[in-house]
Image: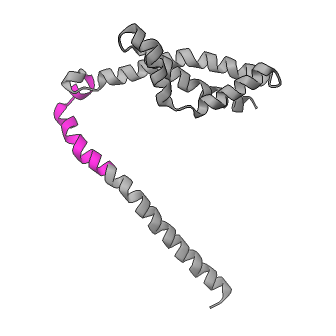
């Protein structure tokens, strides 16, 4: 067997091994998707359009989807302008003390656990208000969103 044939055989064996391991790795994903579809589609079909338009007590998801869009919009309205301004300032004045402090704080905020942000916001906003609110959720999401937007804005400005 020549070197060329040996390399081709080795390459083919490697490709087969990679294909088999990929299939083994992806098989659980297909199993999960199939299980969700087999168990989830019959109730959705049985409910009909009420599944989308009905209230939560009727088993509908419409209000949850609308609430998700509202929270996303409100958190973007709060967080995006602040994040853009912070990063533009830090980009324009990187040597200043505030610029260095901003960069350090953004790195800390990127590593901060989101559950702690939620608990903090609940403690300072939701509990004093006496109820849960979309504003408290949007504020928590804005805090989580700001460092990511600031870092991506900095990357775009480079």
Image coordinates of residue 24 in percent, x first then y, are 41, 63
Image coordinates of residue 40 in percent, x first then y, are 24, 41
Near-viewer residue (2 or 148): 148
Q: Is the residue 22 above or below the residue 119 in the image?
A: below
Count of numbered marks: 0
Tell me the quarter of the picture where residue 23 sits: bottom left
Q: Is the residue 35 above or below the residue 119 in the image?
A: below
Residue 46 within the segment the image draws in magenta: yes
In this picture, which residue range is highlighted in magenta? 33-54
What is the basis of the colouring in this image?
one colour
The quadrant of the rendering that contains the C terminus is: top right
Residue at (53% x, 19% y) in the render: 76
Residue at (23% x, 47% y) in the render: 38
Tell me the quarter of the picture where residue 91 sits: top right
Q: Is the residue 9 above or below the residue 15 in the image?
A: below
Q: Is the residue 132 above or below the residue 152 in the image?
A: above
Residue at (42% x, 9% y) in the render: 128
Image coordinates of residue 142 in percent, x first then y, are 53, 20
For this orientation, the residue located farthest to the bottom is 1
Tell me the quarter of the picture where residue 146 sits: top right
- Left or right, 49 with respect to 17, comes to left
Residue at (82% x, 21% y) in the render: 96
Image coordinates of residue 28 in percent, x first then y, are 36, 56
Residue 45 within the segment the image draws in magenta: yes
For this orientation, the residue located farthest to the left is 46
The quadrant of the rendering that contains the N terminus is: bottom right
Name the dominant secondary structure of the magenta segment: helix
- Left or right, 56 with respect to 125, comes to left
For this orientation, the residue located farthest to the right is 95
């Amino acid at each position: 067997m020549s070197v060329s044939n040996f390399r081709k055989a080795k390459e083919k064996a490697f490709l087969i091994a990679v294909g088999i391991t990929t299939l083994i790795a992806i098989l659980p994903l297909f199993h999960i998707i199939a299980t969700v579809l087999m168990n989830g589609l019959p109730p959705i079909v049985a409910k009909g359009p009420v599944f989308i338009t009905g209230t939560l007590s009727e088993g509908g998801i419409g209000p949850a989807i609308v609430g998700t869009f509202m929270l996303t919009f409100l958190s973007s309205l709060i967080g995006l302008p602040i994040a853009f301004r912070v990063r533009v300032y830090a980009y324009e004045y990187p040597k200043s003390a505030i610029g260095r402090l901003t960069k350090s704080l953004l790195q800390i905020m990127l590593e901060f656990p989101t559950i702690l942000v939620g608990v903090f916001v609940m403690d300072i906003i939701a509990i004093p208000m006496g109820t849960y609110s979309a504003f408290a959720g949007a504020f928590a999401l804005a805090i989580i969103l700001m460092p990511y937007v600031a870092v991506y804005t900095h990357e775009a400005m480079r």
